[in-house]
Image: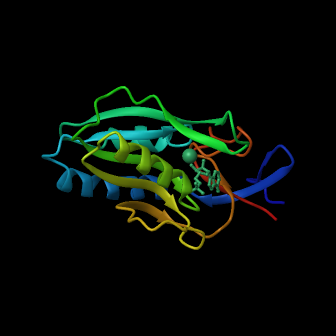
Amino acid sequence: MNQKTINIHDKHFAPFIKFEEIDRAVAQIADRMNKELRDKNPLFIAILNGSFMFASDLFHKLDFPCEITFVKLASYSGTKSTETVRQLIGIDEDVVGRNIVIVEDIIDSGLTIERVLTQLRMIGAADIRIATLLYKPNTFKGDYAIDYVGLEIGNDFIVGYGLDYDKQGRNYKDIYKIVE
Ligand code: IMP
Ligand code: MG
């Protein structure tokens, strides 16, 4: 196994995307936002935990009036069914009529964002855009547009730059891919 491989719990991960490449992708998204969102005073809504690093690096590259808030999807079991409900918590700003940009670390099946979209629409957000650092097009099942994509990747499980494997691995600057 190569020297730079990292071990988390029972799994091995090999170097996949260097920070320099991540940073270029973030800068490209920021450049577009600096043009397209300049006069919209958008509210960025970053989905915790995974998106904290991307949200931070993206946000300090923006040079127009904007706001940011952080939310979490809390899982709890409904009282009458065993089905797990994932409720958006932490929305305290007034989203009614606002231009929203959802900030996510990675979109895989697309289900997480679908739930966030439904809940934001329900409380009256005006225009909702989606920004994700990473996108897995082969597994995406959503029927909504993703406005800002940093990098498209394959189906492999990855860690680093905010992304975890069972809570570990978020601290790495580069992104690593699982070794099967
Ligand atoms: P989705 O709902 O299937 O789109 O999954 C989105 C969420 O699953 C992300 O916010 C991540 O927390 C997690 N996720 C998806 N793929 C990966 C991965 O490769 N590594 C770590 N977390 C992932
Ligand atoms: Mg996430």
In the image, 178 versus 75, the foreground residue is 75
Q: Percent position (x, y) of residue 111?
A: 55, 56
Q: Which residue is rendered at x = 43% and y = 50% of the image? A: 118
Quarter-of-image position of residue 59? top left
**From this viewpoint, which residue is outermost toward the left?**
39
Q: Which residue is rendered at x = 78% and y = 62% of the image? A: 179
Image quarter where the N terminus lies is: bottom right
Q: Measured along the vertical axis of the image, is residue 100 above or below residue 141?
A: above
Q: How is the image coloured?
A: rainbow
In the image, 178 versus 42, the foreground residue is 42
Q: Percent position (x, y) of residue 69?
A: 38, 32
Q: Which residue is rendered at x = 75% and y = 55% of the image? A: 13
Quarter-of-image position of residue 138? bottom right
In the image, 146 versus 13, the foreground residue is 146
Left or right of 126? Residue 20 is: right
Image quarter where the C terminus lies is: bottom right
Q: Percent position (x, y) of residue 43?
A: 29, 38
